[in-house]
Amino acid sequence: MADAMDRTSILIVDDSPEKIVALESILDELGQDIVKAASGREALRHLLTRDFAVILLDVRMPVMDGFETAALIRERPRSEHTPIIFVTAFPDETHVARGYSLKAVDYIFTPVVPDVLRTKVAVFADLHQMTAQVKRQAESLRQRAAQLHRLSTASLEINGAQSLDDMVKVVADSAREILGVPRAVATARVHDRRIHRATSPAALAAPLDGAEDDLVMSIVRSTNFLAVPLTRRDGRNMGELQVSGKPHGAFTEEDEDILVQLAQMTSIAVENTLYGELREANRLKDEFLATVSHELRTPLSAMLSWVWMLRRGGLDAEGAARAIEAIERNVKAQTRIVEDLLDVSRIVTGKLRLDTRLVDLGPIIEMTTDSITPAAEAKGITVRSSIDGATPPVLGDAIRLQQLVWNLLTNAIKFTSAGGRVDVVLATSGAEVEVRVSDTGIGISQDFLAYVFEPFRQADGSSGRKSGGLGLGLAIVRHVAELHGGRVEARSAGEDQGSTFVLTLPVATGREAIEELTPSPPSAETAAPRTAVSLAGSSVLVVEDEADTREALALILAQAGATVTSTSTAAQALDAVAAARPDILLCDIGLPTEDGYVLIRKLRALTAEQGGATPAVALSAFAQATDRARALAAGFDTHVAKPIDPDRLLRTLARALSLAVGDADPGDPYEPALASEAGR
């Protein structure tokens, strides 16, 4: 008995039901499929839908006899070579000759000998089975060759992908095409926060047999599901490749082999890409560190030069004033570098916070433009602004929004040559507000345009580059814009074609709490003169281990009228408190042996009569929100970050002593941070 998969079909054509039954009973032992037809037309209809190993054809039939039926069978390409055995009860040499002329393989007279008929039909059945098997093997080899060819093509496409997102898409599409399945999923896991996944076709998004989010550690093959892991060279899992829904039959070992090969080449390509990213990151890091060194040393060099001239006493009053201005300008330049680095650190750690309220961008742009115009005019650059007075407010942090505009304007001026122009436009576009900063400068190459907002990226990172900076400003712009629910886009036709940066922010919906519009924070260049702060009659204990800083602090406080006692260690400070109760303590955190946290805890452990309630201000170069929180938790009343703005320091001390300090000091994102700013 033949297996169901190997059975062939035998067609019996006769107008006599009795003869059909007789022939069927003889051939039944062969275990093949017997198909019966009572006429030539019925036989032809069967031949339209299936192939037969052999046809037993009666000669004499009404309407269409056996010879006519055979002739029509031979006219059809599908049945042109199907074996035909004529069966008749009328021996006739003419009929025999005609039968063989129609390419019949035999001519049998009835009554037939069962064993003879059975043997002859069995030969053709076996021949048909072997032919079908050869065809299947040939088709399998053809498909295998096509799969290997497509696998080779996929290898080139995978290694030519520009990113991991592109790569996993190529892999998913290739797996679906090679195995002829309706769906494939490729996943590459770099780490928990970086997962690249592509589904082919992308329109299908339902989980794959509930296993899509599970790590595939080894090969999984079921009737309708096949998954293989992506592995690193050390054997660790870094993703998986899954296919499902094979339309014909179950997944085979050959399918598994193909998918494993595709997964292996994908694993190698992913690791090569990650290695390339790491190598590029190391290059950018080295380049960035060299840039930081340059940017910090440049203002230091200028300051040391001016200090050297001041020390020699060779400058007249005008020259001394210029020296002081230059030193102050370079200190601010260094401060901005440090603030940019701190902002990037806050961005990376997710600690950058916004103080949001309704903000009118018009005044912010006007004041930022006014403050930067002198620097532009010094370079021979014209700055023009166009502000739509009907622009609705946005919900945001006024200081951070000014920082965005400032960064975009300084970037435009930096890369624009003398005689150029920078335009600032504020307008409304639907439910969004747009700030456009355009320049006629050096432009941006198409190769670098995609990386312009990445931190530490600069189009020219060589030591001979024309423009300074760390390459952080635009990265900060993008992140802060996204925190506001907006976006920023860079456009340029290419080098020497100028550039345009478009900052887009959503209009306030009106559902926010109604508040007075936040005024624009004045910039450093346009800040109003500050009211002098007096600490007359107050005694201040300064605890600072760095001698130059300690002496400078003592002089600043003394000029404000305070009586100053200076110490360099926590132990000396506690002795000073015991000897004479100061009105306030100004303490550096980074002290030797026992730091400022230890000192304040020991101080707060004293009774009020012993000085335990003395107001205390922490002074530290650690300016993160966690540093401020730690200082307050330890017992300090407030926290001031280095470098110090003397006016702000005096105001902070006066407030802690409940003294009058005049008008409130507005925040400035481009000067050293206040204690409140340290909490961002």
Image (cartoon, rainbow, N blue to C red):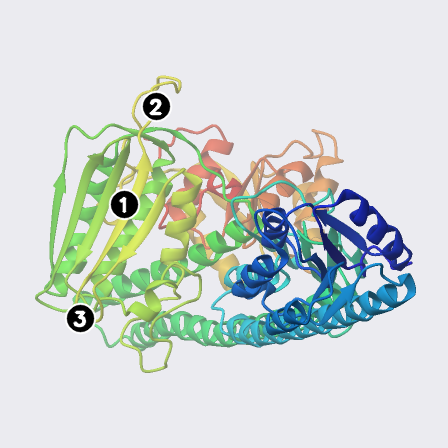
- Identify the residue position indicated by label 1 in the image: 523
| 650 sits to left or right of 598 | left
Residue 38 sits above or below residue 3 on the image:
above
Q: Determine crowd level at label 3: few under 14, some 14-19, many 20+ residues with C-alpha closer than 10 A.
A: some
Amino acid at circle 3:
Asp
Question: Element type at marker 3?
Answer: loop
Question: Element type at marker 1?
Answer: loop
The answer to which image quadrant residue 300 occupies is bottom left
* Marks 1 and 2, how far apart at CA: 29 Å
The answer to which image quadrant residue 389 occupies is top left
Nearer the viewer's eye, disc 1 or disc 3? 3
- Identify the residue position indicated by label 2 in the image: 509
Residue found at x 53% / y 62%: 76
- Identify the residue position indicated by label 3 in the image: 496
How far from the left and from the top, in percent, is residue 21?
83, 46
- Depth check: give the residue in front, 581 or 331: 331
